[in-house]
Structures are given as structure tokens and as C-alpha cells.
Amino acid sequence: MNIELYSFLFLLSLFLGIELIAKVPAKLHTPLMSGSNAISGITLIGAMVLASQIASGTFTIILGSAAVTFAAINVVGGYFVTDRMLEMFKKKDEPKGGQS
């Protein structure tokens, strides 16, 4: 495949992603974030498998390690943000003893 096709696919996915995310209502952001974390987890597993199979040169090892690192950061950060968003929807405990 050539660079023009890759560029076209990247730009098409970029515009499609922007249009889809812009039309998501605020109530659906938390489930959407959870779904994207699951996809990022799959990406992390794929990056680890590919990084372990390609050892043909220094550049490929660095690129594979970077892919694993960035995917792991995305997954961990996404779960922290999702957990924090879900905390906003929980009811706060009332203080005991009738004090406010």
C-alpha cells in the first residue's frame, strides 16, 4: 500500500471521528469512554504481541515499545477518568446525627 492511501484513510477517519464525537449527547460520554477503554485494551494487547514478534532492528523495537507505552497510558488514564466521572453520579452520604 502506498502513502497516499494511508493519508486518505487517516484523514477520513479523523473527520469521521470528529463528526461522531461532536454529535454524542453529554449523557452518553461515560459509556462511550468505557467502550473506548475496552478498544484501547485490545490495542494494548495487539501492540504487545506485535512488539514481541518483531525484533528485526532498533527502530522497530523502539516503535513497538512506544506503541505499548502509549496504549498502556491511554488505558490506565481512561479508566481513572471513567471512574472519576462515575463518582459524580453517586449519591453523597448524608452526615450522621442530623448535622449539616
Image (cartoon, rainbow, N blue to C red):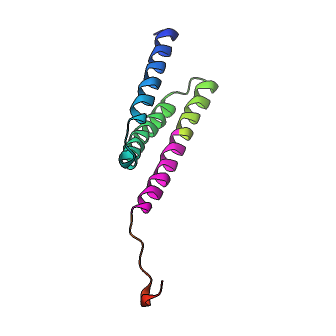
Q: Is residue 79 magenta?
A: yes
Q: Is residue 13 above or below residue 4?
A: below
Q: Is residue 63 magenta?
A: no
Q: Is residue 80 left or right of residue 25?
A: right
Measuring 48% from the left and 83% from the top, which residue is drawn there? 100
Residue 62, picture quadrant: top right
Question: Which contiguous range is marked in magenta?
Answer: 71-89
Q: Is residue 12 above or below residue 29?
A: above
Q: In front: 3, or 51?
A: 3
Query: Principal SS element in the magenta part?
Result: helix
Residue 95, picture quadrant: bottom left
Q: In front: 16, or 73?
A: 16
Q: Is residue 77 above or below residue 22?
A: below
Residue 58 image position (x, y, % from top left) = 64, 26
Measuring 39% from the left and 61% from the top, which residue is drawn there? 89
Measuring 47% from the left and 14% from the top, which residue is drawn there? 8
Residue 19 image position (x, y, % from top left) = 41, 29
Residue 43 image position (x, y, % from top left) = 43, 36
Q: In front: 78, or 63?
A: 78
